[in-house]
Image (cartoon, helix red, strand yellow):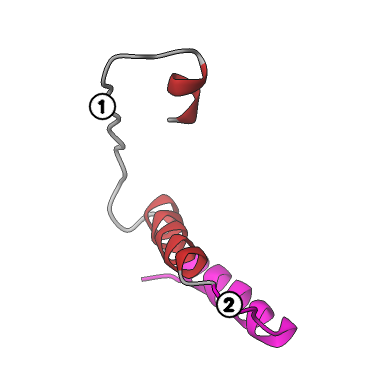
Amino acid sequence: MDRVYRIGQTRPTRIVRYVCDNSIEERMLAVQDSKKLLGEAALHRLTPEEARSARVSDLRRIFASE
């Protein structure tokens, strides 16, 4: 996505992602969304324990078998 704008694209672009249901990729996108929200709301600093807990929960969500 970012590469389109780095090479000087000036016209509107449309980016489509194809993701399989119940796949690791789908869970990774969910983790990305949650991290994006966390980053936007990160006006306060997390303690090292909170950060570690967040990483562990992200890994569990990615590799959870459904």
Image height of 5 relative to 47, above or below: above
Image coordinates for residue 18, horizontal then vertical, percent: 29, 38
Q: Residue at x 46, y 64 (%)?
A: 40
Position in image of residue 3 (x %, y %): 50, 23
Give the residues drawn in magenta, as a range: 43-66
Membership of 38 in magenta stretch: no
Instruction: Decide: is 6 above or below 19.
Output: above
Q: In the figure, 59 relative to 32: above or below?
A: below
Q: Which residue is mark 1?
A: 14
Of the numbered discs in the image, which one, if any, rests on residue 54? 2
Q: Which amino acid type is marked by label 1?
A: Arg
Report the front residue among 38 and 20.
38
State the SS at label 1: loop
Which residue type does callout 2 highlight?
Answer: Ala
Q: Quadrant of residue 9?
A: top left
Look at 64% across and 78% down and name the residue there: 45
How far across and how far down the image is residue 13, in percent? 28, 22
Q: Residues within 10 Å of mark 2 (few under 14, many from 20)?
A: some
Q: Are marks 2 and 1 in contact (CB under 8 Å)?
A: no
Mark 2 or 1, closer to the camera: 1
The image quadrant where one finds the N terminus is: top left
Is disc 1 surrounded by few (<14), some (14 to 19) or many (20+) residues within 10 Å? few
Most foreground residue, 26 or 48:
48
